[in-house]
Image: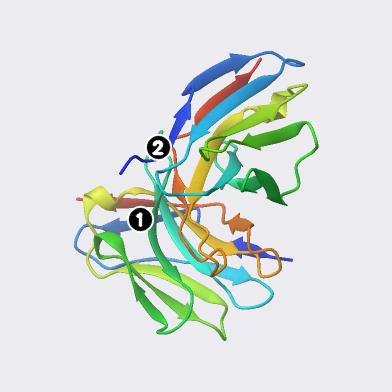
Amino acid sequence: AQSVAQPEDQVNVAEGNPLTVKCTYSVSGNPYLFWYVQYPNRGLQFLLKYITGDNLVKGSYGFEAEFNKSQTSFHLKKPSALVSDSALYFCAVRDGNNFNKFYFGSGTKLNVKP
Amino acid sequence: ETGVTQSPTHLIKTRGQQVTLRCSSQSGHNTVSWYQQALGQGPQFIFQYYREEENGRGNFPPRFSGLQFPNYSSELNVNALELDDSALYLCASSQFSGQGANQPQHFGDGTRLSIL
């Protein structure tokens, strides 16, 4: 079965410090992985994706993610957090058997304190 | 470029009623997906439409149905509403390019449905 796990409900980090939001996945076939961000009362905004190629993927707003096949992980990272990064972050994976289905994690709330 | 728009933004219904939610895809996109996001949870895939036909469905009962129109806009219909249907319903569009679903989805801001 396809699934995504975000083990942390909440991540707290001080502004200027590096941040990591964790994601592990289970999927048949090649994993297509995505990160989205959601601000209050808004839809999800695309940050970055991994399809193939380099394990380090760079995305919007200075975010990047590292794909690790052996650990089936796709952690979201940023070298220096901003207060405006505070939001809800979702990891998603495309179904390896049905390309038209996506599975989302339960989300991680990122709190960046001044 | 026009983004994904959904209407209405908020809706209140009672148990047993029926509801129709609407979505206009981002210009140039030919595929639309619908998701249910319960409070405090991630989006759950309901179904996807491409070329006016359903081409993928999640674990939702048949009382959840949809339509896609020639202009790629879409509707989500839910019959016999239940209390557990209270959620944010998100529409997402993307462009199917023959390379599989590796294109990111663009989401609307959702319709908040409350069932009393």
Q: Position of residue B66 (x, y in %)?
A: 67, 35
- Mark 2, Cα crowd under 10 Å, few <14 / some 14-19 / many 20+, is some
| Secondary structure under the numbered disc 1 in the rendered image | strand
Note whether residue A108 is visible.
yes
| Secondary structure under the numbered disc 2 in the rendered image | loop
Nearest the eye: B27 or B10 = B27
Nearest the eye: B70 or A2 = B70
Q: Position of residue A21 (x, y in %)?
A: 42, 64
Q: Quadrant of residue B5?
A: top left
Nearest the eye: B38 or B97 = B97
- Residue B71 lies left or right of residue B20; in this view the side is left
Extreme front residue here? Answer: B70
Q: Position of residue A87 (x, y in %)?
A: 36, 47
Q: Quadrant of residue A72?
A: bottom right
Q: Nearer the viewer, mark 1 or mark 2?
A: 2
Q: Residue at the location (75% across, 41% down)? A: B60
Give the residue at mark 1: A12
Q: Residue at the location (71% across, 23% down)? A: B83
Q: Which mark is residue A42?
A: 2
- Mark 1, Cα crowd under 10 Å, few <14 / some 14-19 / many 20+, is few
Q: Which mark is residue A106?
A: none
Extreme right residue here? Answer: B62
Can you say which quadrant of the picture contains the N terminus of chain A? bottom right
Whole-number angstrom distance, CA of label 1 to CA of label 2: 22 Å
Nearest the eye: A11 or B100 = B100
- Residue A74 lies left or right of residue B74; in this view the side is left
Residue type marked 1: Asn
**Mark with earlier residue (1, 2):** 1
Q: Chain of mark 1?
A: A
Name above or below for residue B42 compared with residue B18. below
Q: Quadrant of residue A81?
A: bottom left
Q: Residue at the location (56% across, 52% down)? A: A106
